[in-house]
Image (cartoon, grey):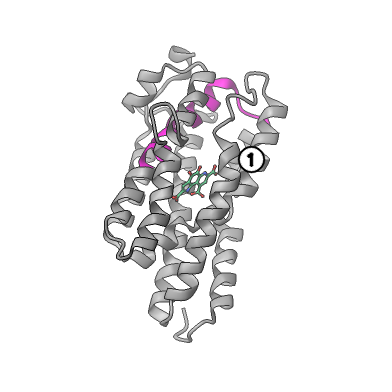
Amino acid sequence: MTNRILTPDALEAALRAIGAERYHNLHPFHRALHDGKLNKGQVQAWALNRYYYQASIPAKDASLLARLPTTELRREWRRRLEDHDGTQPGTGGVARWLKLTDGLGLDRAYVESLEGLLPGTRFAVEAYVQFVRERSILEAIASSLTELFSPTIISERVAGMLGNYDFITEETLAYFKPRLTQAPQDSAFALAYVREHARTPEQQAAVLNALKFKCNVLWSMLDALDYAYVVPARIPPGAFRPDTQA
Ligand SMILES: O=C(O)c1cc(C(=O)O)c2c(n1)C(=O)C(=O)c1cc(C(=O)O)[nH]c1-2
């Protein structure tokens, strides 16, 4: 990084360039998932592992919420908690993700137990939660900016999976529809915050690094799935084995 201060527009362009180069839509496992190249067991493994990410998002948002200094910021961030945890049992993103794992024929208690999780998933998700807990508020908010890029991948995923797998229905993919409006709202707020508050070269470098870090979290979750479940599959001891659960 240079020591020059970027204008807010230049900072935003640099953030978008990171997404264009590093977002997980480019990962081979996602390409295979969306193009219908995976079998049901591999799709189950993706949904089961990604459950841990979904279930951890409200915990990371709650830890940030507790540190936010103003009513306005807390009110904004509280909405994310409600999006994921819902306002009553059976509502919210985590519950909707379980509809996806149900629809794929996975046992709910097994998914929620996290017993079948890949070690790589666990480490990546925990690194994200810890990053948000320990870094500055600016870096924590910047690390959510991968959501700038998620509506595109979600649209691709829904169309690709519905078209390519006979075991996938609109109902099983119901998780994603609300995200198409929630994610732009979340990322617009986070982007405006970062544009306004990342003023020094050091803060701007920290923001760019936070987004790279987050892209790495998402990428390594897919690396773990690719290594374990795509031929030659190398499933770690104790992790989900499609043949025993489907
Ligand atoms: O389907 C996806 O590819 C995808 C990506 C991301 C992301 O980029 O972090 C999120 C989500 N989905 C998502 O559903 C979600 O709730 C979410 C919350 C966050 C976050 O960092 O706070 N990212 C994402």
User: Which residue lies at the image location 55% right of the left edge and 29% below the top edge?
Assistant: 231
Place of residue 135 in the rendered image (x, y in percent of width and height, measured from the top left): 30, 63
Using a 10 Å C-alpha cutoff, classify the residue at mark 1 as few (fewer than 14 neighbours), some (14 to 19) or many (20 or more). some
Please, which residue is most extreme toward the front here? 71
Q: Is 140 in front, or is 39? A: 140
Relative to 78, 162 lies left or right: right
Q: Quadrant of residue 173?
A: top right
Please, which residue is most extreme toward the bottom here? 4
Residue 211 can be seen, yes or no: yes
- The question of residue 42 being in magenta is answered with yes
The local secondary structure at tag 1 comes to: helix
User: Which residue lies at the image location 43% right of the left edge and 40% below the top edge?
Assistant: 84
User: Which residue lies at the image location 54% right of the left edge and 82% below the top edge?
Assistant: 7
Q: Is 120 in front, or is 168? A: 168
Q: Quadrant of residue 58?
A: top left
Relative to 219, 114 lies left or right: left
User: Which residue lies at the image location 56% right of the left edge and 70% below the top edge?
Assistant: 12
Relative to 107, 237 lies left or right: left
Q: Is 37 in front, or is 4? A: 4
Q: Which residue is mark 1?
A: 31
Place of residue 125 in the rendered image (x, y in percent of width and height, measured from the top left): 37, 44
- The question of residue 243 being in magenta is answered with no
In this rendering, is residue 208 above or below 86? Answer: below
Relative to 181, 199 lies left or right: left
Report the label total: 1
Q: Which residues are magenta?
A: 35-56
Residue type, numbered disc 1:
Arg
Q: Main secondary structure of the magenta part?
A: helix
